[in-house]
């Protein structure tokens, strides 16, 4: 099958959407599928407001149509709600073509956190954008419930995975923390207001707090919390080593749809501390893998006592190949048309 993926998020960005798409593409190739990525590459772009690291395609409608027609995919999947996603959605909707979308990001909550726009306004836009899709793919049961409550239909499952060969426990790491060193509490991900990072950085915890990643809030938080180690974005091998060295990953976000960094940390044997909200409650289904508590400090300290071997075993349940087969099963023929909209998702 020839599958076109449309994504406003792509290189050089490092985030959950890009990681998911790249892992999926690798598995799609192994399964014998052809893939084309329609990304901002080759378009005129402008920086995203408040987040200039992200470049958005400028008026891409005609070029998106040209590229879709030139490559002639069997199936088309829209991964993001940016200009490219909107242009591809409009192209398919006007022609009555079948396509799928994914709800990777809690966009209404992010926009509200950044700009104060009422959630109802942005959810209306999201329903408009995803409305013509034959299927809207979601990563977790709790996200499915949330979207259904907001009037979304034709929801279908597409879970997430982790490369357990790359993300693995360090062979030289002592299994006994003992008193030889202070614990390391790690955050990995985008440094932005919607990630609620200050909830972690303001905790009174023993040892060291380490933050891996980049984002628009980095400079502000570095000034507010000078005792915290900010590493910036790291090469993949160093990121793996950071997970391996950490005693707990603290995941303070209340708005993520999944949180791939939790799987990456657990695959390295590092337990997770998080709030009991959408994302963590779906990923940390086994209390042996992490601690969920509205008192994030209590969760972080409790995570130090978990068995790292058990944490690793939990992560081994997630496979990118399984997720990719799930993705393929949800794709629909592009030219099957809008008749598919009447079928249950």
Image: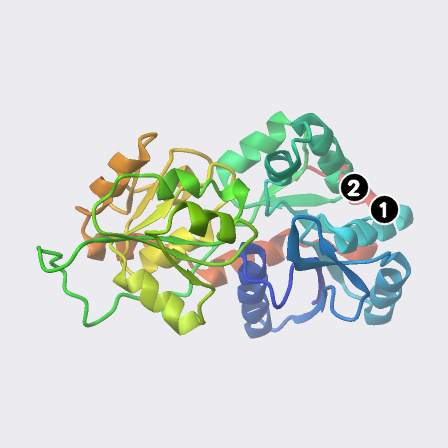
- Residue 117 left/right relative to 27: right
> Nearest the camera: 110 or 61?
110
- What is the secondary structure assignment of the residue under circle 2? loop
Q: Position of residue 265 (x, y in %)?
A: 35, 57
Visible in this render: residue 166?
no
- Residue 340 left/right relative to 237: right
The quadrant in which the C terminus is found is top right
Residue 82 against residue 204 in the figure, above or below: below
Is the C-beta separation of discs 2 and 1 under 8 Å?
A: yes
Residue named by callout 1:
93
> Nearest the camera: 72 or 245?
245
Residue 79 against residue 288 in the figure, above or below: below
Residue appearing at x 59%, y 35% in the figure: 113
> Nearest the camera: 3 or 205?
205
- What is the secondary structure assignment of the residue under circle 1? helix
Graded by Cα atoms within 10 Å as few (under 14), some (14 to 19) or many (20 or more), the crowding at tag 2 reads many
Residue appearing at x 60%, y 39% in the figure: 110
Residue 1 against residue 154 in the figure, above or below: below
Earlier-in-chain disc, 2 versus 1: 1
- Residue 97 left/right relative to 282: right
Q: Position of residue 19 (x, y in %)?
A: 53, 62
Visible in this render: residue 300?
yes
């Amino acid at each position: 099958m020839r599958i076109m993926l449309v994504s406003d998020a792509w290189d050089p960005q490092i985030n959950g959407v890009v990681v998911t798409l790249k892992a999926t593409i690798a598995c799609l190739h192994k399964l014998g599928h052809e893939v084309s990525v329609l990304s901002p590459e080759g378009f005129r772009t402008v920086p995203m407001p408040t987040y200039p690291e992200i470049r958005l395609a400028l008026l891409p409608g005609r070029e998106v149509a040209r590229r879709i027609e030139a490559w002639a995919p069997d199936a088309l999947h829209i991964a993001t709600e940016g200009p490219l996603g909107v242009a591809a959605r409009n192209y398919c909707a006007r022609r009555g073509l079948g396509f799928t979308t994914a709800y990777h990001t809690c966009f209404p909550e992010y926009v509200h956190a950044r700009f104060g726009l009422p959630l109802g306004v942005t959810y209306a836009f999201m329903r408009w954008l995803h409305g013509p899709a034959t299927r809207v793919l979601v990563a977790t049961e709790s996200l499915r419930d949330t979207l259904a409550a907001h009037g979304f239909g034709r929801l279908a499952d597409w879970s997430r995975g982790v490369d357990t060969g790359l993300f693995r426990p360090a062979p030289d790491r002592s299994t006994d923390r003992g008193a030889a060193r202070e614990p390391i509490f790690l955050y990995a991900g985008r440094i932005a207001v919607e990630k609620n990072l200050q909830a972690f950085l303001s905790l009174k915890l023993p040892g060291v707090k380490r933050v891996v990643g980049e984002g628009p809030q980095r400079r502000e938080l570095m000034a507010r919390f000078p005792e915290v180690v900010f590493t910036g974005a790291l090469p993949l091998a160093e990121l793996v080593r950071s997970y391996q060295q950490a005693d707990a990953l603290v995941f303070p976000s209340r708005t993520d749809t999944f949180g791939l960094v939790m799987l990456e940390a657990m695959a390295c044997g590092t337990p997770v501390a998080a709030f009991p909200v959408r994302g963590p409650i779906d990923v940390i289904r086994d209390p042996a893998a992490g601690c969920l508590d509205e008192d994030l400090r209590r969760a972080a300290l409790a995570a130090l006592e978990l068995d790292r071997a058990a944490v690793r075993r939990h992560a081994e349940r997630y496979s990118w190949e399984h997720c990719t087969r799930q993705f393929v099963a949800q794709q629909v023929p592009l030219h099957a048309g809008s008749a598919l909209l009447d079928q249950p998702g």
